[in-house]
Amino acid sequence: MHRQDSQDSPLFGEEDDNVRLKKSNIRHPLASFFHLFFRTSAILVYVLCDVLSGRFIACMVTIILLLSCDFWTVKNVSGRLLVGLRWWNQVDEDGRSRWVFESRKSDGVNKTSSAESQVFWLGLTVCPIFWVIFFFSTVFSFNIKWLAVVIMGLVLQWANLYGYVRCKVGGKSSLRKMAKTYISGQIFKQAMKETEKT
């Protein structure tokens, strides 16, 4: 009997080169670089704006462009390539908005490396914390002219963080199932302990 090896086609239109990776390799150095470049550049321009240039408008436009490039790059490129996740909003024919969260099918070959995954999640989680700090420092110092820029940084970076956490963990129903399973397991363990005591 002829045995045929089944290979899933790569998700998201990626080419499959059938190369087995060491877990520490960075397979997509350009995507890894730009994943961190735009977000750290926006933070650096914000912090060094008064030192680099006294012109508020030039700094504001630069930061907004960097934040927009970061949002697009993380959502459309680095999430797919580095960790195999993607999310988007889809409008149905009846006009309802629906969020879609996807993750790459896990087959025998590990298509993402641990180094790329660490770069992705580190950049995705650390940088929004800076924008939260900037928000509070802007509000408490009454530096209102920067408030719109800081809010834009918060919204764009937290949107990507939320989207990818939903992709990684699953939808609300999965979260509810996990919580119910955990709670019912704890109740069962407690009941077993009580019956052993009697």
Image (cartoon, rainbow, N blue to C red):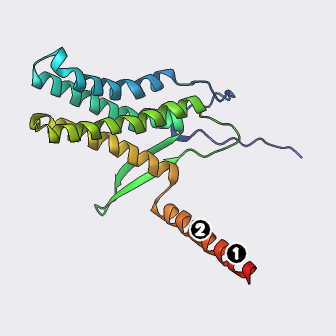
User: Which comes before the other along the chain, label 1 or label 2?
Assistant: 2
Locate the C terminus by quadrant: bottom right
Q: CA distance from mark 1 to mark 2?
A: 18 Å
Mark 1 near mark 2, Cβ–Cβ under 8 Å? no
Image: 12 above or below 45 = below
- Residue 55 is situated, as x and y percent measured from the top left of the image, at 10, 20
Residue nearer the viewer, 36 or 195:
195
Which amino acid is tagged 2? Answer: Thr
Up-down: is 37 above or below 144? above
Residue at the spot of label 2: 181
Where residue 21 sits, quadrant-wise, is: top right
What label does residue 193 carry, if any? 1
- Under circle 2, the secondary element is helix
Task: Give SS at disc 1.
Answer: helix
Most foreground residue, 58 or 76: 58
* Extreme residue in the front direction: 197
In the displayed structure, 97 sits above or below 193; it is: above
In this picture, residue 77 sits left or right of residue 135: right
* Front one among 89 and 78: 78
Query: Height in image: 36 above or below 154?
Result: above
Indicate left or right for 184 with 168 as reference: right
Q: Nearer the viewer, mark 1 or mark 2?
A: 1
Mark seen at residue 90: none
- Of all residues, the one furthest to the bottom in this rendering is 198
As shown in the figure, which amino acid type bears the numbered disc 1? Lys
Residue 149, horizontal then vertical, whole percent: 18, 35
Residue 198 seen by the camera: yes
Could you tell me residue 73's position as x and y percent? 38, 32
**Residue appearing at x 54%, y 30% in the figure:** 116
* Numbered-mark total: 2
